[in-house]
Image (cartoon, rainbow, N blue to C red):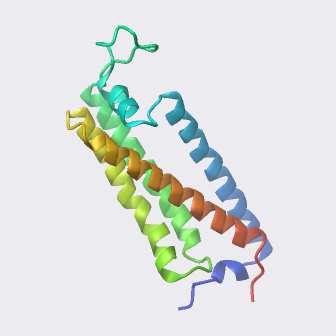
Amino acid sequence: MRYNGLLLSLPKEIKSFLAVFVVVLSVGYATGLLFVGQTETTTPEGIEENYLGNEDDPDAAVMKFEKGEREMLTIIHTHILSMSFIFFLLGSILLFAELPKKLKFFLILEPFFSILLTFGGIYFVWKGIEWVKYLVLVSGILMTFCFAASAVIVLYQLLFKKGN
């Protein structure tokens, strides 16, 4: 079955539906990134502080307390499930875009590894394995890059590129 480029030959109504979905999904993802910025978890030290607390720092601008096990499991559970659905849906659309096979499969599969590394890594940081915070940061950046690249490619092909 030929599926590479099938996105370009869809009827206008389906293209519009998919484009609006990807835009709304992107707004939701961007809102999540704004929240990450608000919690100051954009640095290795911020990641560690957000989950392990900073109550020992008398000069801290915002007091943060170590997360409990129940809270950590809730954070990890909800993020792994929701991010999996986000990337499943976006990847399902990207699968039908016109792209080189290796790039397409990288953008479709890599986010799932980053989800496990990012949120599994957060758990290990919370357990006291502090060097994992660097892995969390890198995998989170890579996951975001894959989301942005996939969304831009899909939107470009849905809205601007003409099919054969």
Q: Quadrant of residue 71?
A: top left
Q: Quadrant of residue 90?
A: bottom right
**Whole-percent x, y for residue 35 in the image:** 53, 33
Q: Is residue 139 left or right of residue 68?
A: right
Q: Quadrant of residue 126?
A: top left
Q: Is residue 21 left or right of residue 44?
A: right
Does the rendering let one see residue 45?
yes
Is the residue 117 above or below the residue 151 in the image? above
Which residue is pictured at 57% across the width and 36% down the height?
A: 34
Which residue is pictured at 47% across the width and 29% down the height?
A: 40
**Whole-percent x, y for residue 94 in the image:** 57, 71
**Whole-percent x, y for residue 63 in the image:** 40, 13
Q: Is residue 45 left or right of residue 151?
A: left
Which residue is pictured at 63% across the width and 51% down the height?
A: 26
**In this view, which residue lies farthest toward the left?**
128
Is the residue 35 above or below the residue 91 in the image? above
Which residue is pictured at 64% across the width and 82% down the height?
A: 6
Does the rendering let one see residue 119?
no
**Whole-percent x, y for residue 162 in the image:** 78, 80
Is the residue 42 above or below the residue 57 in the image? below
Q: State which quarter of the image contains the C terminus.
A: bottom right
Q: Nearer the viewer, residue 73 or 137?
A: 137
Q: Nearer the viewer, residue 95 or 152?
A: 152
Is the residue 147 above or below the residue 157 in the image? above
Q: How many marks?
A: 0
Q: Nearer the viewer, residue 56 or 26?
A: 56
